[in-house]
């Protein structure tokens, strides 16, 4: 039986997650699985970088991976994209390709991340 609990990554940001009967946490949305410290660090890095960058600006998931592990960031690329997909599902960010919002479940190739509604605020 699942029950909702509040998850708080290190940066003080909060997301909803589910606690399974086995006691592990998983993010809401189509990306089940345990939320590791690295997952939480990547999500916090994404939101922190977007906050620093400002309205209407984008980041690459690799920037979050480099922030979490400057020397060993390459293996963190897929976990960074996964963290981004979870943030999209939570309604916090959008994933784009060539400036257009894309579905994170089907996006392949290079993507950029931005705060929701950033394109509308630019004009």
Image (cartoon, rainbow, N blue to C red):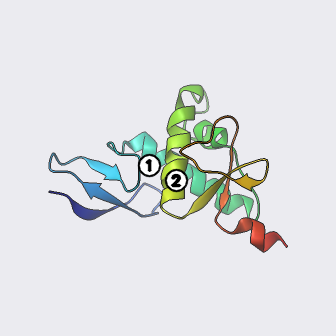
Which percent across, then down, holds residue 15? Answer: 41, 62
> Which numbered dot is residue 40?
1
Cβ atoms under marks 1 and 2 closer than 8 Å: yes
Residue 83 in the figure: left or right of residue 65:
left
Residue 10 in the figure: left or right of residue 94:
left
Which percent across, then down, holds residue 114? Answer: 68, 57
- Against 61, residue 20 (above or below) is below
Q: Residue at x 15, y 50 (%)?
A: 21
Callout 2: 10 Å neighbours few (<14), some, many (20+)? many
Which percent across, then down, holds residue 63? Answer: 66, 42
Q: Residue at x 54, y 57 (%)?
A: 88
Viewer can see residue 23: yes
> Which numbered dot is residue 48?
none
Quarter assignment of residue 17: bottom left
Q: Residue at x 68, y 34 (%)?
A: 109
The residue carrying mark 2 is 44
| Label 2 element class | helix
Quadrant of the drawing holding the C terminus: bottom right
Q: Name the one closer to the observer, 22 or 8.
A: 22
Quadrant of the drawing holding the N terminus: bottom left
Which percent across, then down, holds residue 76? Answer: 53, 32
Residue 100 in the figure: left or right of residue 71:
right
| Label 1 element class | helix
Callout 1: 10 Å neighbours few (<14), some, many (20+)? many
Report how many numbered discs are placed on residues in the image: 2
Viewer can see residue 55: no
Q: Name the one closer to the observer, 107 or 70.
A: 107
- Against 116, residue 48 (above or below) is above
Q: Name the one closer to the observer, 22 or 73.
A: 22
- Against 60, residue 109 (above or below) is above
Tell me the CA gap for discs 1 and 2.
6 Å
């Amino acid at each position: 039986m699942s029950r909702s609990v509040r998850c708080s990554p290190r940066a003080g940001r909060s997301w909803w997650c589910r606690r399974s009967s086995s006691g592990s946490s998983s993010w809401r949305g189509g990306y089940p699985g345990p939320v590791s410290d690295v997952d939480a660090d990547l999500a916090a890095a994404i939101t922190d970088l977007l906050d620093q960058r400002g309205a209407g600006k984008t980041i690459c998931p690799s920037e979050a991976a480099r922030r979490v592990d400057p020397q060993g960031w390459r293996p963190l690329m897929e976990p960074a994209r996964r963290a981004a997909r979870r943030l999209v599902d939570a309604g916090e960010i959008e994933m784009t390709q060539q400036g257009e919002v894309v579905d994170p479940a089907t996006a392949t190739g290079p993507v950029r991340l931005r705060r929701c509604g950033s394109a509308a605020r630019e004009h």
